[in-house]
Amino acid sequence: MRPALGFIAGLIFGIGLIVSGMADPAKVLNFLDIFGAWDPSLAFVMGGATLTALAGYRLVWRQGSPAVGARFDLPDNTAIDAPLITGATIFGIGWGLGGFCPGPAWTALALGSPGTLLFLPAMVIGILLGGAAKSFPIFTTKGA
């Protein structure tokens, strides 16, 4: 049941990305271009997502346990450390250069966006390199 619910949630997310226009990298790049053809629509999409998540979390936390599963899956590590800052910075640079983040990139693949065919393989390679980099001492966190 859990995989089916995950599929449905992903499908709704993907449809939302298409309807909101966020599968188009030009939307993201225009949002980041504050001195050019600035497009504030991404801010409205993020604001709507934030309000929806806020309402959803408030409803879910009132329950004793999740609808599917024995307990809520919460992160154990809440530290803001060098690996988190480094990863977020690299993610942000990639998002700013390409106009894609992972969810919209996969959605844009189905739409046949030309930049997706270059971005997705590079993203997958980056994910693999990031996983391999965790074994280097500079990227490890003490006590983790």
Image (cartoon, rainbow, N blue to C red):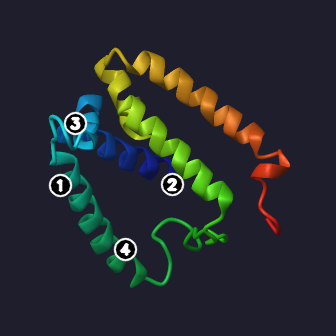
Q: Neighbour class for label 3 at 10 Å: few (<14), some, many (≥20)?
A: some
Q: Is residue 36 visible?
A: yes
**Residue found at x 28% / y 33%:** 23
The mark closer to the camera, 4 or 1, is 1
In the rendered structure, which disc, 3 or 2, sits on the residue that comes first in sequence? 2
Give the residue pinned by disc 4.
57
The mark closer to the camera, 3 or 4, is 3
Query: Toward the viewer: 69 or 107?
Result: 107
Give the residue pinned by disc 1.
44
Q: Which mark is residue 114?
A: none
The reply to whether discs 3 and 1 touch (Cβ–Cβ < 8 Å) is: no
Name the kind of residue labelled 2 in the image. Answer: Arg
| Circle 4: element type | helix
The reply to whether discs 3 and 2 touch (Cβ–Cβ < 8 Å) is: no
Q: How far is the residue under mark 3 from the one under mark 2?
A: 37 Å
Give the residue pinned by disc 2.
2
Q: Is residue 62 above or below residue 57?
A: below
Q: How far is the residue under mark 3 from the one under mark 4?
A: 31 Å
Q: How far is the residue under mark 3 from the one under mark 1?
A: 14 Å
The reply to whether discs 4 and 1 touch (Cβ–Cβ < 8 Å) is: no
The mark closer to the camera, 3 or 2, is 3
| Image quadrant where one finds the C terminus | bottom right
Q: How far is the residue under mark 2 from the one under mark 4?
A: 19 Å
Q: Position of residue 58 (x, y in %)?
A: 34, 79
Q: Is residue 132 left or right of residue 60?
A: right
Q: Is residue 76 left or right of residue 143?
A: left
Q: Position of residue 57 (x, y in %)?
A: 37, 74
In the rendered structure, which disc, 2 or 1, sits on the residue that comes first in sequence? 2
**Residue found at x 66% / y 71%:** 76
**Residue found at x 45% / y 69%:** 67
Q: Position of residue 102 (x, y in %)?
A: 45, 38
